Image: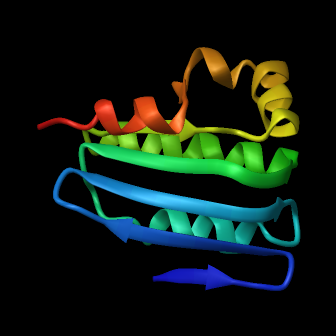
Amino acid sequence: MGQHSERFHVEVSVADDVVDVRAVGEIDIATVGAFRAGLWAAPARPVLRLDLSEVRVLSAAGVRALVAAYLRARSRGGELLLVDPDPVVRRVLHATGLHRVMPIVESAAATELVPA
């Protein structure tokens, strides 16, 4: 399942204890709706892993969507993990202080953090 546009798309896959969301492209004011829709399409699970390795732009609108997704996951008793952010996106996460709130993990470590 996923949301697609020319500049951005998101793919969602669901397992018993984890939802994997893979975002590709630019998350800005024009594409944040598709990003948000992809995140909201994810059913409640203990872990929501958001792969940001192919996101090249994360605007303020994208940051707000991330915060909303984090709060939504927490309210459902889950956790949001940010996986392999692109260096540009990583700088945004550090500049906004989100790296102190949302765990940033490498893809190999992300699979180890899922409950057994």
Most extreme residue toward the front is 108
- Judging from the image, the colouring scheme is rainbow
- Count of marks placed on residues: 0
Q: Quadrant of residue 4?
A: bottom right
Residue found 73% across the figure and 18% down from its top: 97
- Which quarter of the rendered picture does the C terminus lie within? top left
Residue found 85% across the figure and 27% down from its top: 91
Describe residue 27's horizontal placement relative to residue 98 as left or right: right
Describe residue 61's horizontal placement relative to residue 116 as left or right: right
Describe residue 52's horizontal placement relative to residue 90 as left or right: left
Q: Quadrant of residue 25?
A: bottom right
Residue 107 vertical placement versus 103 (above, below): below
Residue 56 vertical placement versus 8 (above, below): above
Residue found 78% across the figure and 20% down from its top: 94
Describe residue 39's horizontal placement relative to residue 9 as left or right: left
Residue found 16% across the figure and 58% down from its top: 16
Q: Position of residue 75 (x, y in %)?
A: 33, 40
Q: Position of residue 40 (x, y in %)?
A: 47, 66
Q: Position of residue 69 (x, y in %)?
A: 52, 48
Most extreme residue toward the top is 100
- Which quarter of the rendered picture does the N terminus lie within? bottom left
